[in-house]
C-alpha cells in the first residue's frame, strides 16, 4: 500500500510495508529528533483536565520535550501562554496555582503579567531603551489551546487544523458518552524505560490478553477465543459448551477482574449494579442470553446512575447509534478506555529515545455539585511498583523487555497482524506523514481513520 508521500521530504526508517515496523524507529536518535522537530510541534497535545482549572485565575503548567506552556482560566475562557519571561527568559510558572488578582511575577527581576498575558510591570523601566519596551513585545505570546472531552489541548502550530477537525467523528461519538462531564478520581504516573511508541502500542490491541492478562482470559476465554483464536474445524465453538447462566457468570467475573485490575474503568458502582442482575430470566440460546443480559445491564447502569443524579447517557441507545471501541486512541498520545458509565484515560509523553512518562487517570461521572476535589498532581510510582493496579502492572512488565529486545541483531522490523494490529501500523504511518511533510488537512483526515481502529485492520490513510 503506497501512501503517496514519497515525493515529499525524506525521513529515515519509513514504514514501507504497512505490516512491518522498522525497529530503529523505537530508539534511533535521529528519528527521535525528527519526531520532536516535525511532529510534536504540529499536533494537539492533551495539556490538562479542565477540572484542574475551575476558577478564573487558576493555572497549570504543561510541558513536553522542553517546551513549557501555562494553561490558565480567564474571564474569556481558557488561554495558554508560552512559559518564559519576556526579559531574560526565566520560566514564569511551575506546577499549578491560582493568581486571579496578582497574575504572574517573574522570580528573577520581578516583571509581571496579568492572566490575559498583558505585561503590567517592568521594574526600573527608565533603565531600558524605548525599543525594548514595546507593549506588544512584552505581552506573553499565546499558544493555541482548544477544549474537548473535559480537557485542554495545546498546539504549537498556528496553522494546524482545529482540534475537532483532527479528532474527527470520534469526538462526536465520545461526546454522546458525556466524556466532558467525567471527573478524575486518581492519577498515577510512571517513567518507563521504553520509547513512547512502544509503551503506547501495548494498548492498541487486545491480542495480548491471553498471555499478558491470563486472569482475564481465564474468566472470559470464549470471548477472547472468538476474537483471536483460529476456528477449530467443525467443532462447536467453545462458548457453546457452557450454559447461558454460566456464561453470564463468566462475563461478570471478567468485569470484576477488570474493575480490580484497573482500580476503575469498570467502575465499582457498575460492578455492584451488575452483581444484582445475575439471577434475571434469560433465553436459553447463549448469544441471545448475552445480548439480553447486557441490555438489562446497560439499562440498569443508566437508570441507577441517573437516580444518583449522575449525567449517565442512555447506554442502550448509544450502543446502537454511537458504538465505540474498548480503547479509543486520540493521536498522538491520548487514550480513552470507556466501560459502561466510566473510563480510564492514558497520556504518554517522550522523555528521550528510550524513556517515556506514562500517566493513567480513572474517570467517572458524579452528580452536579458533588464532584470530588480535582486531582492536581500525578502520583508518581516506579514502573514496577506493586502499588499499580494489577492490569497496568502486567502491561508495564512487558514494555521494558520489549525495548531491549528491539535492539537484538537481526530483528529489523516488528511483524504485525494486518487484521487486528492495524492501528499500530496506521498511527506509525501517520507519524511518517508528519516527518515527510504531508499537507496538514491530509494528516487530519488520516487521523480520522484511527477512531474505532482498536483491534482493527490496516487502512489506506490517503496520504
Ligand atoms: S528574567 Fe524575568 S524579570 Fe528578568
Ligand atoms: Fe493490557
Image (cartoon, rainbow, N blue to C red):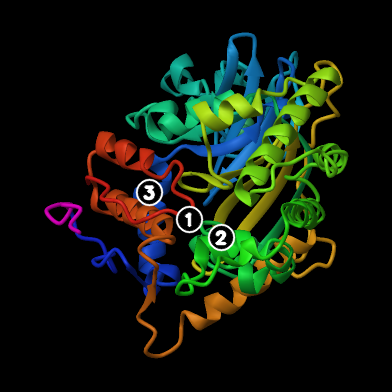
Give the label on residue 439, or none.
Answer: none
Q: Residue at x 71, y 18 (%)?
A: 57
Q: Is mark 2 within 8 Å of ligand 2?
A: yes
Instruction: Mark 2 or mark 3: name the one nearer the start of the chain.
Output: 3
Instruction: Mark 1 or mark 3: name the one nearer the start of the chain.
Output: 3
Horizontal side of 175 relative to 435 (left or right) equals right
Residue 4 magenta: yes
Local secondary structure at mark 3: helix
Query: Looking at the image, can residue 127 be seen?
Result: yes
Give the label on residue 455, or none.
Answer: 1
Q: Where in the image, quadrant-wise, is ligand 2 located?
A: bottom right
Q: Is mark 1 within 8 Å of ligand 2?
A: no
Horizontal side of 209 relative to 190 (left or right) equals left
Q: Is residue 166 above or below residue 244?
A: above
Horizontal side of 162 relative to 259 (left or right) equals left
Q: Which residues are magenta?
A: 1-8
Give the label on residue 206, or none.
Answer: 2
Quadrant of the snapshot with the N terminus:
bottom left
Residue 143 magenta: no
Estimate the x, y position of residue 161 in percent, counting from the top left: 34, 29
Q: Nearer the viewer, residue 192 or 207?
A: 207
Estimate the x, y position of residue 297 in percent, counting from the top left: 74, 35
Residue furthest out toward the top: 75
Estimate the x, y position of residue 31 in percent, counting from the top left: 36, 65
Write down the residue under mark 3: 39
Q: Nearer the viewer, mark 2 or mark 3?
A: 2
Task: Name the quadrant containing residue 152.
Answer: top right
Q: Is residue 239 above or below residue 307?
A: below
Query: Spatial distance from mark 1 to mark 2, Cα to Cα?
Result: 6 Å
Q: Is residue 391 above or below residue 65?
A: below
Local secondary structure at mark 1: loop
Q: Residue at x 51, y 56 (%)?
A: 204
Amino acid at each position: 500500500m503506497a501512501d503517496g508521500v514519497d515525493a515529499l521530504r525524506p525521513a529515515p526508517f519509513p514504514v514501507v510495508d504497512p505490516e512491518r515496523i522498522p525497529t530503529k524507529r523505537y530508539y534511533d536518535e535521529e528519528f527521535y529528533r525528527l519526531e520532536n522537530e516535525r511532529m510534536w510541534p504540529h499536533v494537539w497535545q492533551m495539556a490538562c483536565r479542565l477540572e484542574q482549572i475551575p476558577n478564573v485565575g487558576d493555572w497549570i503548567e504543561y510541558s513536553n520535550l522542553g517546551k513549557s506552556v501555562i494553561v490558565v482560566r480567564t474571564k474569556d475562557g481558557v488561554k495558554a501562554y508560552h512559559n518564559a519571561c519576556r526579559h531574560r527568559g526565566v520560566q514564569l510558572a511551575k506546577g499549578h496555582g491560582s493568581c486571579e488578582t496578582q497574575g504572574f511575577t517573574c522570580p528573577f527581576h520581578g516583571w509581571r503579567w496579568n492572566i490575559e498575558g498583558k505585561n503590567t510591570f517592568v521594574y526600573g523601566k527608565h533603565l531600558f531603551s524605548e525599543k525594548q519596551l514595546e507593549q506588544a513585545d512584552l505581552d506573553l505570546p499565546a499558544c493555541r489551546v482548544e477544549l474537548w472531552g473535559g480537557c485542554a489541548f495545546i498546539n504549537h502550530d498556528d496553522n494546524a487544523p482545529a482540534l475537532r477537525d483532527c479528532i474527527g467523528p470520534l469526538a462526536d461519538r465520545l461526546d454522546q458518552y458525556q466524556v466532558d462531564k467525567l471527573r478524575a478520581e486518581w492519577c498515577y504516573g510512571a517513567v518507563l524505560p521504553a520509547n513512547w511508541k512502544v509503551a503506547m502500542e501495548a494498548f492498541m490491541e487486545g491480542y495480548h490478553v491471553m498471555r499478558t492478562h491470563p486472569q482475564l482470559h481465564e474468566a472470559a476465554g470464549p470471548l477472547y477465543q472468538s476474537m483471536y483464536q483460529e476456528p477449530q474445524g467443525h467443532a462447536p465453538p467453545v462458548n457453546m459448551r457452557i450454559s447461558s447462566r454460566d456464561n453470564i457468570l463468566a462475563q461478570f467475573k471478567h468485569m470484576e477482574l477488570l474493575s480490580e485490575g484497573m482500580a476503575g474503568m469498570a467502575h465499582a458502582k457498575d460492578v455492584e449494579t451488575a452483581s444484582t442482575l445475575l439471577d434475571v430470566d434469560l433465553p436459553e440460546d447463549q448469544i441471545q442470553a448475552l445480548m439480553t443480559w447486557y441490555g438489562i445491564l446497560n439499562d440498569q447502569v443508566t437508570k441507577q446512575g441517573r437516580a444518583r443524579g449522575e449525567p449517565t447517557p442512555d447506554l442502550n441507545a448509544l450502543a446502537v447509534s454511537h458504538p465505540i471501541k474498548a480503547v479509543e486512541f486520540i493521536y498522538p498520545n491520548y487514550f480513552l478506555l470507556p466501560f459502561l458509565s466510566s473510563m480510564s484515560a492514558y497520556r504518554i509523553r517522550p522523555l528521550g529515545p528510550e524513556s517515556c512518562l506514562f500517566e493513567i487517570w480513572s474517570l467517572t461521572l458524579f452528580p452536579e455539585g458533588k464532584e470530588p476535589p480535582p486531582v492536581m498532581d500525578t502520583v508518581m510510582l516506579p514502573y514496577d511498583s506493586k502499588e499499580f493496579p494489577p492490569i497496568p502492572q502486567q502491561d508495564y512488565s512487558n514494555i521494558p523487555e520489549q525495548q531491549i529486545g528491539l535492539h537484538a541483531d537481526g530483528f529489523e522490523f516488528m511483524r504485525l497482524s494486518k487484521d487486528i494490529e492495524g492501528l499500530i501500523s496506521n498511527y506509525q504511518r501517520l507519524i511518517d506523514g508528519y516527518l515527510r511533510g504531508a499537507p496538514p488537512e491530509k494528516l487530519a483526515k488520516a487521523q480520522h481513520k484511527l477512531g474505532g481502529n482498536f483491534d482493527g485492520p490496516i487502512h489506506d490513510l490517503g496520504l
